[in-house]
Image (cartoon, rainbow, N blue to C red):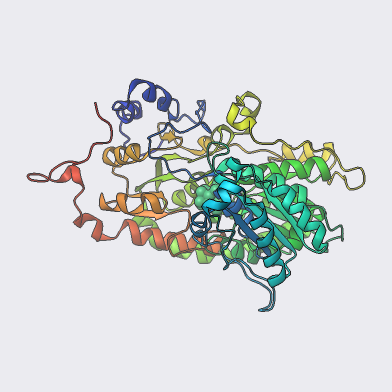
Amino acid sequence: MEANIHFPDPSKVREELIQRYPAKVAKKRAKSIIVNDPQLIPEVQANVRTVPGIITQRGCSYAGCKGVVLGPTRDIVNIVHGPIGCSFYAWLTRRNQTRPETLLDANYIPYCFSTDMQEENVVFGGEKKLKVAIQEAYDLFHPKSIAIFSTCPVGLIGDDVHAASKEMREKFGDCNVFGFSCEGYRGVSQSAGHHIANNGVFKHMVGRDNTPSVGKFKLNLLGEYNIGGDAFEIERIFEKCGITLVASFSGNSTVSQIENAHTADLNVILCHRSINYMGDMMETKYGIPWMKVNFVGAESTAKSLRKIAEYFGDEELKARVEEVIAEEAPKVQAVIDEILPRTTGKTAMLFVGGSRAHHYQDLFSELGMTTVAAGYEFAHRDDYEGRHVLPSIKVDADSKNIEELKVVADPELYNPRKSEAELEALKEKGLEINGYEGMMKQMTRKSLVVDDLSHYESEKLIEIYKPDIFCAGIKEKYVVQKMGIPLKQLHSYDYGGPYTGFEGAVNFYKDIDRMVNNPVWKLIKAPWEKTGNGAGLSASYVTQ
Ligand code: CFM
C-alpha cells in the first residue's frame, strides 16, 4: 500500500529525530524508529528500558495491573498497599464505566481504597496495617473479593501481601482475598503489570464456578475495558445478534462472570497486548480457542461479527449477523457521506498504549485520513510485527522477572471446543485462530513506526509533518495543542465515546471532523512559525 499523500523522506526524518541525542542514546533509539514496509515488516526494538532522562509516555507496572486489568471489575474491593498518592492518581482517571444491574448491586469503582502507608510502616513494615485495612473493607462491604496491589515501597521493604491475603481469606471463608506483586518498578512499563494481573486473575478467579452458562453462542470478550462506554456498545450489538457474553475482561464485569468464564466456547481478544496471556492460558487449560477481533471502526466491527459467526458455523447466526450489519450500516453511511469530503486527505499520528495506535487507524481510514506515523508506548514486537515473531523475541532480564505460569490441561474441565481439523478448516477460511498480524502490516509503506516515543521526538515529528491531528494522552495534550495541532486523547477519549461498534464510529467521525476542521488552530502560531522577538524554541532538550 502506498499513501497518495506526500511524505517527507522518512529516513531523513529518522536521522533528524536522533541527531541531537548523545551517540549511545542515538544508537539505541534508532532501533525503535523504523520506516515501515508492510511487505517486509522490519524489526522494531520494543519492550526495552527507556533511557533514563528521556521524557517517556510510559506508566508503571502497578498502573497496568491495578488500573488497567483489575480496575474495571466493579465488585472487587481493590486495596492499594502503599502511599496515598499511588491510589489517588489511579482513581477514576481512566473513565472505565460500569453499569450495575440494580442500585443495590455492589459497585466499588467510585471508591479509593488505600493503606495510606506512612514512614513508620516503611521502616517497621506494613503488613499489620494491611491486614487491618482488609478487615475494615470486609466489615464495611462484605465483598465477594478483595484484591491487594503492591506499590514500590512494598517490594522494597518486603511486605508479603500474598501471605497476608491468604491469612485473611482463610479467616473470612466467604471472601476471596488475593494479592499482586505489581510494584511499579517491575518490568519496563505497565505491560509487566498486565502480565502479572493476567496470572493473578487466572489463578484466583477463572474456573471457580463451574455452573454451565446458558446460550447457544457463548463467548468472552477479552481486552475491552469499557472506556467511555465502549463495552456497552459491543454488548448492544452482541445482544442484537443473539451472541451471549459470558464474561468481559474486564469492562463492565463482575467477579461471578470471570469465575464462570471457562464455560464459554470462544475468547475474542480486542486488546492483544494487555490480555493475550489469558487467551493462551484458557486455551491450554480448558480448550477454548481465541480469535483477534477489532470493534473499533464500522467496517472492522462488521468483519469481526462475521468472523464470530463463521467460528460458530451456524447458518442462522450468520444470517442474523448480516441482518444486524444491514440495519446499522445506513446510519453510519449517512454520517460518513456528509463528513468524508471534509476529512479526506488529512493526516493523523497515533502514539498510544499497546493496541489503540493500531485499532484507531481503521477509523481514520474510514474518514479518508492517512496515518503517517504511529507507535505504541509499551507494546512488544508481536504487536507491531505479528505473532509469528514470538519465537525470535529475546527474553531479557526485565521480562524474566515476571512469572510465566506453568499451565496444563485441566484433567476434568479440558474440552477442546473445536477439533484440530475444524480449526484448520477455519484457518483456511481466513480466520486467524490464536493469532495476530500486528500493526505494521496495515500501515502504508514509508510511514514511520516509533516505539516508546519521547517527548522531544514528538515535538520534532509535529514540526516536520504538521499532521492534522495528533492522538495521545493527557500528558501530551496541551503541549501539542500549543503547537497549533489538535490532540485527541485516545486513552480517556477526552469527554467523548463510546467509539466502538457502529454508534461509536459515528461518534468518532463527528468528533474528529470538529477537531480537524476547527479554524481556531490556524490562529495559533507554533514556536517555529514565529519571527522577530521570541522566535524559535526557548528551551533546548539536549545539550550539544
Ligand atoms: Fe490495551 Fe487499553 Fe491499550 Fe492498555 Fe492503557 Fe487504555 Fe491504552 Mo491507556 S489495555 S494497551 S494499558 S487498549 S489504559 S484501555 S488507553 S494505554 S492503548
Report the residue that reaches farthest toward the left.
532
Q: In this view, does 505 lie to the left or right of 240?
A: left
Q: Which of 174 and 502 is in front in this view?
A: 174
Report the residue that reaches farthest toward the right.
412
Q: Residue at x 31, y 49 (%)?
A: 480
Q: Which residue is drawn at 41% across and 40% down?
A: 56
Would you place residue 359 above or below residue 225 in this image?
Answer: above
Q: Is residue 97 left or right of residue 207?
A: left
Q: Which of 343 and 224 is in front in this view?
A: 224
Where residue 416 appears, x then y in whole percent?
85, 43
Q: Residue at x 66, y 79 (%)?
A: 103
Q: Which of 513 and 302 is in front in this view?
A: 513
Where residue 414 appears, x then y in whole percent?
87, 44
Q: Can residue 244 be seen in this view?
A: no
Q: In this view, does 247 lie to the left or right of 398?
A: right
User: To which quarter of the image does residue 399 belong?
Assistant: top right
User: To which quarter of the image does residue 2 belong?
Assistant: top left
Q: Which residue is drawn at 40% across and 48% down?
A: 369
Count the marks: how many? 0
Where residue 174 appears, x then y in whole percent?
81, 64
Q: In this view, does 408 lie to the left or right of 450?
A: right
Q: Nearer the viewer, residue 67 or 506?
A: 67
Q: Can residue 150 be seen in this view?
A: yes
Would you place residue 50 above or below residue 307 in this image?
Answer: above
Q: State the quadrant of the C terminus.
A: top left
